[in-house]
Amino acid sequence: MLRTVSCSASLTSASPFFRFFPRSYSSLSSSTGALRGNLRRVSNPSSAGRRVFLRRGLRVPSVAGRGVNRQFSRLSVRAVATQPAPSYPDVGQDEAEKLGYEKVSEEFISECKSKATLFRHKKTGCEVMSVSNEDENKVFGIVLRTPPKDSTGIPHILEHSVLCGSRKYPLKEPFVELLKGSLHTFLNAFTYPDRTCYPVASTNAKDFYNLVDVYLDAVFFPKCVDDVHTFQQEGWHYELNDPSEDISYKGVVFNEMKGVYSQPDNILGRIAQQAISPDNTYGVDSGGDPKDIPKLTFQEFQEFHRKFYHPSNARIWFYGDDDPLQRLRILSEYLDMFEASPSPDTSKIVPQKLFSEPIRIVEKYPAGRDGDLKKKNMVCINWLLSEKALDLETQLALGFLDHLMLGTPASPLRKILLESGLGEALVSSGMSDELLQPQFSVSMKGVSEDNVQKVEELIMSTLKKLAEEGFDSEAVEASMNTIEFSLRENNTGSFPRGLSLMLQSIAKWIYDMDPFEPLKYTEPLKALKARIAEEGSKAVFSPLIEQFILNNSHRVTIEMQPDPEKASQEEAEEKSILEKVKAGMTEEDLAELARATEELRLKQETPDPPEALRCVPSLNLSDIPKEPTYVPTEVGDINGVKVLRHDLFTNDIVYAEVVFDMGSLKHELLPLVPLFCQSLMEMGTKDLSFVQLNQLIGRKTGGISVYPLTSSVRGKAEPCSKFVVRGKSMAGRAEDLFNLMNCLLQEVQFTDQQRFKQFVSQSIARMENRLRGSGHGVAAARMDAMLNIAGWMSEQMGGLSYLEFLRTLEKKVDEDWEGISSSLEEIRRSLLARNGCIVNMTADGKSLTNIEKSLEKFLDLLPENPSGGLVTWDGRLPLRNEAIVIPTQVNYVGKAGNIYSTGYELDGSAYVISKHISTTWLWDRVRVSGGAYGGFCDFDSHSGVFSFLSYRDPNLLKTLDIYDGTGDFLRGLEMDQETLTKAIIGTIGDVDSYQLPDAKGYSSLMRHLLGVTDEERQRKREEILTTSLKDFKDFAEAIDVVRDKGVAVAVASAEDIDAANNARSNFFEVKKAL
């Protein structure tokens, strides 16, 4: 399993439009990281996404970058010169009329090289945006306005439930069948505070239209509106296994939201949104408050679907290289079945009127008893910027302003707050325009009681100073280049470009505004640059600070105070309510509830009949390429350094990775490596302050990042342990890129004690947040550290051991700074050397040739050999069952073992089997029946570690028992050829995951480092394609090692751990983390 902890000096998604996702709840599809070559990335320095919560997703994705705990939606459009529109298939007015549509407007969007046509379905009024281009990664999405009136979570529960069977697909969960057996590049659903989105994507046209049909039928004709069991499963129900036992609440959304609001950052986000817009739909929680979810009735649930899930209230998006006429034909089959509805009038979002004076709120949040609670306050200042929609140029200017103030470590507002020492880290900070009215917020956590007022004053005084003095020209140039580079690069990572565009468009379209406008940034950007050139940046940005922030009375200040009693009080309140419910029941009522509980469980655990499964459309094995995708790779040599070149079209951008070996690093220095990386990026040189260096990177490149990388290598005892420097620039700036890489690596001085102390505080805050929100990742790292050396190395740099190291280091910074500074220098000497270095470059052939001299010069400046000799890595944590205690209402439960220890030899069928276990046995037992947000397994083919993990799980020992039953599940498995074919196709979809050019080059590098040859990839593919039922049954013997010799790690509440240790005498060794 490949692990990295990344420090970056560039925004991964520097959008000039300042949107992040404000408390959207997304149904991320099951994790299949293991199936894509076992690559797992854990980004440490900057977790992404302000208030982004996942449903079906189990690996919480994060973005490392200069952003301040917020996620910009990536502006998936490319800056291009004005040019004639390419010829794309057209839908004539007559053809549209025959299918029941009228053309509203049509434009060529040069920014994304697309022809976009807006149609209106005449019978229902449904609007359809049809975007045609050469992108093979086709995207469909249907978006409905779904404003809730209370916090029962009805839009969120409905978003889960409509994917649980429909008119044409009457099985339990077509969504899961699509996960198992399609080539989707995206399959998901999002619940926003005021809308619900259902997007899919695929590069295969047949597969794409299958996905579209299943989603349309699910949205408009779901079974859930007539099936109370689905409502109970996904929303909430009383559970009683025996009349003598206590009643409990169960439900996937109920437990998900308990997990969401076990995290202080998310509690702050909810309070901030509701306080800033108390008088409209944003004043309630669309995701659901666990206290209110049990108030929702099935009748209200049914009525909400009837009211809002109608074509008249829908916006539909198509994007890609498929036939635009076929899109309309598919839609007509559904839309023609409906008459017009008044739902667009009832779903309109009413603007929040601006306050006449600021308000202040003080709230409590649940906290552990360890540490100094007086230093755990949080402060947030929020502004609602306008009652009316902003014009695009103002929106663009505010986006630049946001980046200037907060976007990088050198940005003044961010820098001043962090350097003040008044708090540990910024959280939930930045501009947002995802909802009807734009917002701006600045928040800080780890603030002592005495400093709360000082933080508020510092935020206001800094904003005032910025308005008075403006920004220096280098900062403005760096910000402009960063954003323009991002636009040109059009890099959305694994996220489909068409979906990124859809989310931008819908942010205006859903409010009855122009859906084309957010896609066309060229002219507003040109106008903004001209204004800055003509009037100066101060004349552009200072009035914005004054108008929208300083002179804006619609300001809400929130102080969050830690309360070690709150979690137990909330549990006691819930228990009291349930005791009253039981006391009000007769014996007959209790017997009926126990019967209903068992009836629901039997339904959940009974598989769909084969005839129901066959109704879900799928591909055939003949539709699947027999060979893997090959990346052009030329292996060469410069000055004794191995160089990998990948000749791919990259729009004149060069991507470069320089990889150094960590083989000479002393064991005791390993936990310092993440802070060494951050110090390289955020400390200065003899001649440049870190602010100047940061601005230089922003002005000359598309960003540079540095991080350690570790992985087991199959068949070898020694792990792969590397230090990676990754950067990108325009081809003409490659010399600047390599010069800046050299500057960072060799000239940065480790002399700034106070900044280093900030890094430690920020890292502690991030790790504590990770424990609460991504406990499954912490558990997985802990188990890996017990089972293999690479896992131990990774856990030392990003797991619980790292958090313990940081807490000790925090005290040591003042006591022995000289020793720490010396250790950082020693790390540099141990890593930097030409000997053992590998360079990876991805660009077009001409650019690769042109940058060779710059690369040669860079390599010449490196030392020949590292200091010190090779070190033998042999560390592991002791094998034991471990429970990590945190204040939480839900648990994260893991169990793992090494199946290679049984003599099992890797076969491609293992990928098919592990995916099938996740999407059947674990999905049904851990999630559907157990009520967890999710359960999945992960097979690391490099180390042989097979892991089971659950996410936001109300259970503990029960989940471990399910894991232990996996071998018997495989032995008793019956599977027809169709089901087996689906499992194979779904696995190939994961193996062949869609990649942009930079990802192709990087994946090739990873395969090179781990010794994975093209011949091996072909062999594994053939084994995947020929997987048989016998392979499943044989694999049961290998997986039994997890049951018999595996280790269990749970991140859970003290109460649940005590109960587990009482039920199974001292099963867990307990460690208190928070």
Image: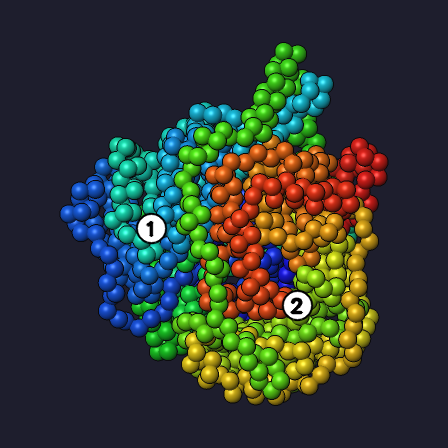
* SS for callout 1: strand
Asked where in the image residue 113 lies, by quadrant, the reply is bottom left
Q: Are marks 2 and 1 in contact (CB under 8 Å)?
A: no
Which residue shows up at 56% across the image and 56% down it?
A: 1020
Which residue shows up at 54% across the image and 67% down it?
A: 1004
Residue positioned most to the left: 94
* SS for callout 2: strand
- Determine which residue is flagged by label 2: 708
Give residue 605's mark: none
x, y percent for residue 156: 49, 38
Please indicate, yes or no, whether residue 1030 appears anywhere in the rendered image.
yes
Q: Earlier in the sequence, mark 2 or mark 1?
A: 1
Q: In terms of depth relative to the viewer, which is nearer, 150 or 588?
A: 588
Which residue shows up at 81% across the image and 73% down it?
A: 816
Q: Residues within 10 Å of mark 2 (few under 14, many from 20)?
A: many
**The N terminus sits in image quarter:** bottom right
* Up/down of 553 relative to 935, above or below: below
- Determine which residue is flagged by label 1: 318
Horizontal relation, residue 743 to residue 524: left or right: right
Q: In terms of depth relative to the viewer, which is nearer, 888 or 354?
A: 888
**Callout 1, which amino acid?**
Phe
x, y percent for residue 730: 45, 77
Mark 2 to mark 1 CA distance (whole Å):
40 Å
Q: Residues within 10 Å of mark 1 (few under 14, many from 20)?
A: many
**Callout 2, which amino acid?**
Pro
Q: In terms of depth relative to the viewer, which is nearer, 776 or 261?
A: 776
